Image (cartoon, rainbow, N blue to C red):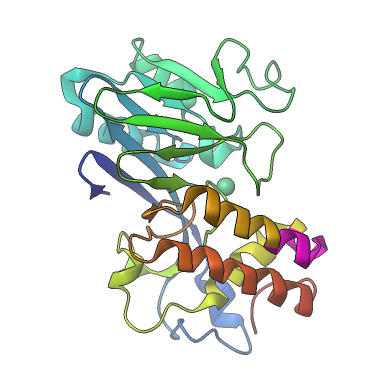
């Protein structure tokens, strides 16, 4: 399933991991969840079309090889895929790298310059990018950034300058109901509940429970100042396209809540 989030930027969505049982079994169900409904933490890839060149950010999981190959065909057609950027070598993000490169011999593989396991992950032949590096796609530029919050040393974040979109990879993920798939956060019913962000960051980014709240939240302030994005396109959440900085601000409550609660499996 795909959706254009801004002219030339396409959201390629996979349901990812099924969290229904976790929320069904929770003693106290989070406010956004209703019994009997399916809930997912999604897996997202993004395709950016420039006037001259095209770029795919992440690959979905190996459960969706056909889906990502079809999405590339549908979205770039005969133009071809010029760049495949792998945010980090985790299977759900990078698992279709070789399937894509096999189908698209025209594609340049782009990997984070950070970390030192490139050979292990067979990324040593890639174009490696770090803070400040950019790829000009024609009428738009993809710029790369050191990942502030990450789960692997070989990691990179990206922004797209024209639409001011931030791609923060594993940061700012959250679960959603089945019927909320591919909705923008501003299209959800009711108020967006920070407990969704707490659930993801307390469980998936497990190191969150050990962080220094003050330092982490000062870092979030730095990110808001540095990026001040119009759109946030996370790898494991729905796209935020209104008041994006306010959601980054909300991440400070997430840090505080996780610190207060200690390790959590889920809210409940
Ligand atoms: Fe991830």
Q: Is residue 112 visible?
A: yes
| Residues in magenta, as a range | 208-217
Residue 212 magenta: yes
Q: Classify 80 as above or below 69.
A: above
Residue drawn at x 65%, y 75% as measured from the top left: 266
Residue 235 magenta: no
Residue drawn at x 61%, y 83% as measured from the top left: 26
Total count of labels? 0
Q: Nearer the viewer, residue 256 or 181?
A: 256
Q: Main secondary structure of the magenta part?
A: helix
For residue 90, what is the image quadrant? top right
Q: Is residue 163 left or right of residue 151?
A: left
Q: Classify 37 as above or below 106.
A: below
Residue 2 point in image, percent of width and height: 26, 47
For residue 267, what is the image quadrant? bottom right
Q: Which residue, as the protein is rendered here, is positioned at the far front?
A: 225
Residue 117 point in image, percent of width and height: 73, 23
Residue drawn at x 77%, y 73% as measured from the top left: 259
The quadrant in which the C terminus is found is bottom right
Q: Is residue 175 visible?
A: no
Residue 72 point in image, percent of width and height: 28, 30
Q: Is residue 129 left or right of residue 9?
A: right
Q: Nearer the viewer, residue 65 or 51?
A: 51
Residue drawn at x 40%, y 31% as measured from the top left: 142
């Amino acid at each position: 399933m795909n959706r254009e989030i801004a002219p030339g930027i396409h959201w390629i969505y996979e349901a990812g991991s099924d969290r229904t049982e976790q929320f069904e079994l929770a003693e106290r169900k989070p406010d956004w969840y209703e019994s009997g409904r399916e809930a997912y933490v999604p897996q997202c890839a993004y395709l950016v079309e420039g006037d001259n060149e095209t770029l795919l950010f992440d690959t979905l999981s190996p459960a969706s090889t056909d889906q990502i190959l079809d999405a590339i065909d549908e979205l770039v057609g005969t133009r071809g895929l010029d760049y495949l950027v792998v945010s980090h070598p985790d299977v759900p993000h990078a698992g279709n790298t070789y399937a894509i490169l096999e189908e698209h011999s025209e594609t340049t593989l782009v990997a984070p310059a950070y970390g030192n396991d490139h050979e292990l992950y067979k990324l040593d032949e890639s174009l490696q990018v770090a803070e400040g590096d950019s790829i000009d796609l024609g009428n738009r530029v993809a710029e790369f950034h050191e990942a502030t919050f990450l789960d692997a040393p070989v990691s990179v974040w990206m922004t797209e300058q024209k639409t001011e979109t931030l791609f923060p990879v594993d940061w700012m993920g959250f679960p959603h109901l089945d019927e909320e798939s591919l909705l923008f956060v501003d299209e959800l019913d009711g108020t967006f509940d920070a407990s969704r962000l707490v659930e993801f960051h307390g469980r998936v980014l497990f190191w969150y429970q050990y962080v220094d709240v003050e330092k982490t939240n000062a870092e979030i302030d730095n990110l808001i100042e540095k990026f001040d994005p119009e759109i946030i396109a996370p790898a494991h959440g729905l796209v935020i396209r209104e008041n994006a900085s306010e959601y980054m601000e909300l991440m400070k409550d997430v840090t505080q809540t996780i610190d207060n609660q200690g390790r959590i499996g889920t809210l409940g």
